Image (cartoon, rainbow, N blue to C red):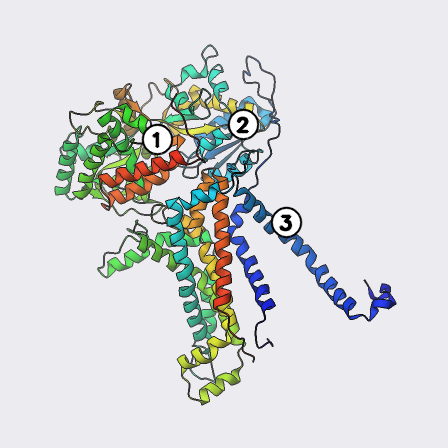
Amino acid sequence: MPPRFTPERVRYDRRYRTLDKYRFIVGFLAVPLAFYALFVISPFLQAIYYSFTDWSGGPVANFIGFDNYRKMWNDDRFWDSLRVSTLLLVVAPVVTLVLGMFFAYMITSGGRHRRGRAIAGVAGSSLYKVVYFFPQVLSVAIIAVVWGRVFNTNSGLINGGLDKIGINGPAWLGGDETLGLISLLIVISWSFVGFYVVLFSAAMGSVPQDIYEAALLDGAGRARTFFSVTLPLIWDAVRTGWIYMGIQALDTFAICLVMVPPHVLKVTPVFLYERFRDGQYGYATSIGVVLLVLSMAFSLIVMRVGNRDRIEY
Amino acid sequence: MGSTSVNRREVMKRAAAAGLLAVPAVGLLSSCASGGGDENKAEKGEKSKKNPLGVKTDAGLTVYIFNGGYGDKYAQFVTDMYAKKYPKAEPDQKATEKIATQVQPKLVRGKPTADVVNNSGADEMNIGKLVHNKQVADLGEVLDAPSWDDPKVTVRETLVPIVEEMGRFGGKPCYQLNIALTVYGNWYSKKLLEQGLDSEYPKTWDAMLAVCKKAKAKGIHGWSYPGGHPRYMFFSMYAMFAQRGGRDVITAMDYLEPTAWKNDAVKDVFEAWEELVAKKYVLTGFDGTEAHTEMQTAWTKEGKCVFVPDGSWVENEAKDTTPKDFEMTVGATPSLDSGDKMPFGTLYAPAGEPFIVPAKAENRQGGLEWMRMMYSKEAALNLFKEVGSLPVVKGAIDGQQLPSGTASAKAAIEAAGDNIVIPKFFDWYNELFREDFNNMIHKFMQGQIGAKQAMDTMQKASDRILKDPDITKIKKA
């Protein structure tokens, strides 16, 4: 209530003050939260419901219990796709975060000690920051199409280049699963690394200079400084990035669908999409629910594993 | 950034936040909600001699055309005819490569915006499901209607019989209508084969291997394989299954019988191909989504291979790269030996380019009328002129000057007579072809698996579909 109308009795009561504070916060958050509930949460609950039906796009959806999940358990195609998705979930974040951290460190503190500062980026780092971010502003579909051309067996950029130096390039997307996975990983990492460079640069930028100066006086080199000073101080950002990248990797849909022919490999979202296309909506939503559970489990595990004491500075 | 340790509540908060981040990962699922089964308020007009289907003359019409190898100009011709007859309707035609993406969501909700759809291409809607859910109209009304050119004859009588046969799904009603005949088989350049290699078209498999050997000596591959779209191999294999073992073999495949892919005829055909692959007669290296185009270019422009597995759309699709004196020709699949049950000339030649009318289309009668116009002589002739394929309307292209590929396709159909074979499972259980055969044949063409594993894989897939409660089975009548 506005202060004028607050009864004298409770005006100075601490409990009322707390209530008042939350009322203020809730007032501001009500509209966005309502939107979120309507457009994100409610479809979720609907999807979970549909996953227990045999809905196939018609007006009727019969409740069939766990039949869809049973079917999934016995479906080799699902396990094949899950194997690929799990591999991506494990490997893609590692590759992307390591690269992102390396670039960010080079940009913020990899250079020579100029202008009397303890740390400085490599020459041209302000330009690199912009360039790394380029893939982020491209549409995913364009990335997939362009890279598909790059990987082309006969006329692609990679094999064309290898030809020039006398190496017969492999068929990247020609059916070999390992090569297909490598191609997919390259594209995923390439397209996301810019985001993590920016994220980690910001985190590193907030680390106070005097800690670096002290490390320098103690005679720490660049690598030592990174592992003993920078990494522990930006750990929170790393963990957030890890979760986010893991979810991105699980959700690799468009790139895989557009770039990789379906007989080479499939990620689970592509398999889900195909079931949708064949009108098996109930089955498709049950696969979606499994993906949701996997994303949640992954986030919680990373939360637990990556839990460290926060360092004050 | 003050606290020295993270307390439990903090963890829970962050976990919740991370969970919310994870939420959009399955956001794909949220885009659909099942529609109610409300009344069909299709617009109807008065039936008359001039308007046998009772089209409401001022109701709008929306046509969706798959924009693939055929383009959409042939359909625009029909849409223009419609506009001429019903000027108030202002029909609207949309062309897309993604039919399911564009049409299906609204159709599933029971509020389709399309009145007639060319359900074709890689992103086609699963017709079996649409039939099962009663989302497509019975097109028998079109077939029973008097034809556009001659009111004394029904539309049915003007078409080749396989059109209706292919639109049926184990029952009487006909749910999809095709407009063009597709001839599948082994496509080659007559000039290269007869002058370059000094050979006849091989009618037996031994002769085929001999031609390949000759080609190899000249530094050309006898065959080619579009690795990005492995399923193309089916076009040159399917008729051989029937040839080898008779119609029973392919009927067993259609009805998912427990030994459909396990019999000797299938084995013999796979083994024949296995030999061809093992001898390195096949040109490979076309991977990715444009594989078929790359292969066709290597075949027409660069003359790197003799035979390609393809369908009769190839003449139109590859016309920009085809030399004038190429003499594109289709050949029927070779016989294995004298033990074959069906003669050489047996042809895999279904009607193609399916059209459907949504059951709840706002202007359903208009959609049916559009189909009736599509089957008029002038539209059929125009279809031929635009895309060079054979229309299903009898006698529509009599007396026309045919390009070489189309002429050979027409000749192949005439030579086949009654020996036309059509894989019903192609429409009924599309995933068996599009996914299982596709994935299996890729390994086969790479030489990673042999005939035995190929048969096992296909049988396993066939059994899986038979057991899958989500797929409506068609029972043998």
The chain letter under disc 1 is: B
Q: Is residue B415 visible?
A: yes
Residue B288 image offset from top left, x and y in percent: 34, 47
- Tag 1 and tag 3 share a subunit: no
- Residue B359, numbered label: 2
Q: CA distance from mark 2 to mark 1?
A: 29 Å
Q: Are marks 2 and 1 in contact (CB under 8 Å)?
A: no
- In this rendering, the answer to whether A293 lies above or below B406 is below
Q: Secondary structure at mark 2?
A: loop
Q: Secondary structure at mark 3?
A: helix
Residue A65 image offset from top left, x and y in percent: 52, 41
- The residue lying at 50 percent from left, 44 percent from top is A285
Residue B90: quadrant of the picture: top right
Tell me which amino acid carries mark 3.
Leu
Tell me which amino acid carries mark 1.
Leu
Residue A223: quadrant of the picture: bottom left
Residue B262 image offset from top left, x and y in percent: 26, 33
Q: Is residue A195 visible?
A: no
> Which residue, as the protein is rendered here, is positioned at the far bottom?
A217
Tell me which amino acid carries mark 2.
Ala
Q: Nearer the viewer, mark 2 or mark 1?
A: 1
- Residue B256, numbered label: 1
